[in-house]
């Protein structure tokens, strides 16, 4: 069976018309799929982000409630009541903790973190590593309140020294090493009080938070009146993520 030239041309034109139609319409399918995927991504992204923020906020509220926190003194009022060595600009407003106040402590929020300080507590004797007995009790009291949150948060232990240079020590070379060993000592106290090691981080910061460097020196150039409250520990609680530990 043979086709004449007219019939063959008609069939070819029909085929070309069909091919053109498919090519022109195929982009719409891909475009629609792409828009659907983008929409799905943004819906999931904003839902997950909101849930994370809500979880962080709930954790903060629970911790502050546990420590007896309430909206309270302004930054100026707290400064008059108890001079503090700040870690930086305070965020989300100042808070006062009634329970902590009984121990000489203060609490404030810094983003999704809760920062606890004891501005008028000397945690270590001059040039020593071990936590003083009275400060051990402070850390134990903190641990008893905090331990229930250890599963959902991590605890950073930041230790500091005063401005007196380290001399004639075989255990450490300078204040930075001394502060790191002090952080370990505080960590041990908290561990023995029930906080798991895998929920704690430590760091030594040397004399970076010395409040008022003294100008009084002895004959050897050593500072006579070091700031004993600079020998301190700052505790930072934040939501737990595996990346942070």
Image (cartoon, rainbow, N blue to C red):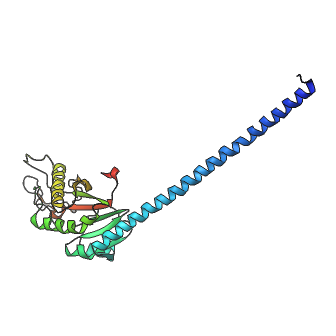
> The N terminus lies in which quarter of the figure?
top right
Q: Which quadrant holds residue 6?
A: top right
Name, please, the residue furthest toward the front.
Answer: 1
Query: Which residue occupies the extreme top position in the image?
Result: 2
Q: Quadrant of residue 184?
A: bottom left
Of residue 41 and residue 219, the one placed in the foreground of this image is: 41
User: Which residue occupies the foreground of this view, 85 or 142?
Assistant: 142
Can see residue 84? no
Q: Is residue 77 visible?
A: yes
Residue at (21%, 65%) from the top-left corner? 143
Spot occupied by residue 31 in the image (x, y as percentages of width and height): 66, 46
- Expressed as whole percent of the image width and height from the top left, the position of residue 16 reads 81, 33
Q: Residue at x 19, y 55 (%)?
A: 183
Q: Residue at horizontal 89%, vertical 31%? A: 10
Identify whether 74 is placed above or below 239: below
Res. 224 image quadrant: bottom left
């Amino acid at each position: 069976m043979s086709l004449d030239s007219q019939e063959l041309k008609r069939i070819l034109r029909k085929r070309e018309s069909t091919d053109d139609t498919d090519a022109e319409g195929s982009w719409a399918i891909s475009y629609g799929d792409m828009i659907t995927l983008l929409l799905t991504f943004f819906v999931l992204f904003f839902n997950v982000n909101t849930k994370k923020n809500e979880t962080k906020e709930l954790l903060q509220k629970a911790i502050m409630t546990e420590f007896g926190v309430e909206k309270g003194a302004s930054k100026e009022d707290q400064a008059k009541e108890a001079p503090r060595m700040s870690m930086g600009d305070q965020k989300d407003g100042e808070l006062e903790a009634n329970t902590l106040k009984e121990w000489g402590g203060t609490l404030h929020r810094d983003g999704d973190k809760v920062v606890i300080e004891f501005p008028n507590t000397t945690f270590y004797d001059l040039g020593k590593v071990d936590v003083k007995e009275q400060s051990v009790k402070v850390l134990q009291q903190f641990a008893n309140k905090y331990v229930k949150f250890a599963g959902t948060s991590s605890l950073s232990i930041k230790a500091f020294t005063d401005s007196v240079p380290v001399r004639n020590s075989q255990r450490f070379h300078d204040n930075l090493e001394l502060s790191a060993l002090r952080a370990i000592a505080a960590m041990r106290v908290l561990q023995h009080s029930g906080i798991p090691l895998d929920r704690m981080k430590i760091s030594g910061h040397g004399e970076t938070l010395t409040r008022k460097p003294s100008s009084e020196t002895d004959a050897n150039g050593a500072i006579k009146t070091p700031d004993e409250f600079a020998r301190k520990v700052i505790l930072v609680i934040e939501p737990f993520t595996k990346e942070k530990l």
